[in-house]
Amino acid sequence: MILLRRVAVLWIVLAAALGAIEREPLEAYRQRREALAARHSDGVVLLFAFTEREGQFTRSPFRQENNFYYLSGWNEPGAVICLLGEDKASPPLEILFLPGRDPGHEAWTGRRLGAEDPDAAAITGFKEVRPLEDLAKVVSAALKDRRRVYTLKPRETPGYEQPPEPDRSARLEELAPGHPKVDIRESVEAMRSLKAASEVRLIRKATEASMAAHLAAWTKMDSGIYEYQIAAAMLAVTMDHGCLRAAYTPIIGSGMNATVLHYSQSTRQLKPGELVVMDFGGEYGHYATDITRTVPVDGRFTARQREIYEIVLGAQQAALDAIKPGMTLGGHSKKSLTEIVRDYFNSHGSDQDGKPLGAYFIHGLGHHVGLEVHDPGDSGAPLEPGMVVTIEPGLYLPKENIGVRIEDMVLITEDGAEVLSKGLPKDPGEIERLMKTRSVEPRATVGAQ
């Protein structure tokens, strides 16, 4: 009976701890912690989880700070990670500090894991789990043999769709008075830029769910409905596929709104003869995806709309044909995918006044995707196998009431790239055929898991 009760409690705690989201294997997080600690073995690594208020920001349920999650897979508030790399004075150490349980609060939010739970180490994957009240004592002892404290300092500018990062400097000074506090963001973000196979698997699932959402929106598309109804249909499908939330605020822009890059009001009624830019991706297991398609409200492109659409599609294909390790997303060299796209636009078509179309490509060609929709990554640095990026050329002609963007998720491989979202049609003829029947099914994606 005691064993059964313990197993029941374990499953309740485990379900709450995971937040009902799929994670990578615990070993993946452990290996990252070991690598980070070894790289900074002359000091103590201290990382702080979001508080409950910080982790909700504009989102609910609670969502962990990305770097903390990357190293722990832990999605509960208030925790602290302490890491020590092996040196001559002491062996390596990894401790997860958990705040004390509050049964009164848990009556509202659900049971939380406490350091005193006998299965805390097995659930979290940490070698040691201790109460938060022990943190100061452990840090003080560790700093007898080490001088620095390595931590994550807040970014000056928050990431896209991410909450401002809290400043822990006062708390760090209390824990380690007089010791230098060194930012390890560069180390962590360099690790995050190269996705493990277990990360790509979660991104694939987010992408599969989001492709289904785009196709569902096509079946609903019609003049007279509102942009927010399109967004609602997409959100419903991704959640039905296991996504807890959208990876970013949906961009559903019809008519003139299609020429506004990050339009997010979604309040306009769709009109006959217009285009709709649908930039939407779900978040699965904490990982984002980012896909854009542009479709005609009535299910058929006008001649001019199709002309612009096919130019954007051709530019994207030129980038996809060239993408491989060593190329760059941005920059101005011969290896720049942005320059390939801009040259394509300038040599294919013009505006109503005869001006080359390159002037209407007004944003970057793509960005890295992972735990954030705009994940760490330098657009001017060479691409490497394991990186996941978007390729999203677009043309925006307000005078013609035409905006077209086509965006796909791309995994860089050893000898080229794989388009993760290739199952979502983008050929204009195929889009018209599918929208004519208003009955669409996602194509199987090779390699999807």
Image (cartoon, rainbow, N blue to C red):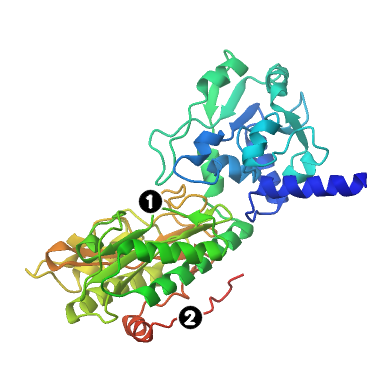
Q: Which residue is drawn at 51% across and 34% down?
A: 53
- Residue 309, horizontal then vertical, whole percent: 26, 74
Q: In this view, does 263 lie to the left or right of 129?
A: left
Given this view, does label 1 or label 2 mark the residue nearer the observer? 2
Q: Is residue 74 above or below residue 23?
A: above
Residue kind at label 1, given as amino acid type = Gly
Q: Which of 168 and 418 is in front in this view?
A: 168
Q: Residue furthest left?
A: 353
Which residue is disc 2 drawn over?
441
SS at mark 2? loop
Q: In this view, does 316 lie to the left or right of 361?
A: right
In the rendered image, is residue 324 in sight?
no
Image quarter of residue 329: bottom left
Counting every numbered tag in the picture gives 2
Q: Nearer the viewer, residue 321 or 283?
A: 283
Q: Which residue lies furthest to the top in this view?
A: 178
SS at mark 1? loop
Q: Which residue lies furthest to the right in this view?
A: 1
- Residue 400, horizontal then vertical, whole percent: 13, 68
Residue kind at label 2, given as amino acid type = Glu
Q: Is residue 215 above or below residue 332?
A: below
Q: Is residue 126 left or right of residue 341?
A: right
Q: Which residue is drawn at 45% across and 59% down?
A: 389
Which residue is disc 1 drawn over?
380
Q: In this view, does 201 lie to the left or right of 439?
A: right
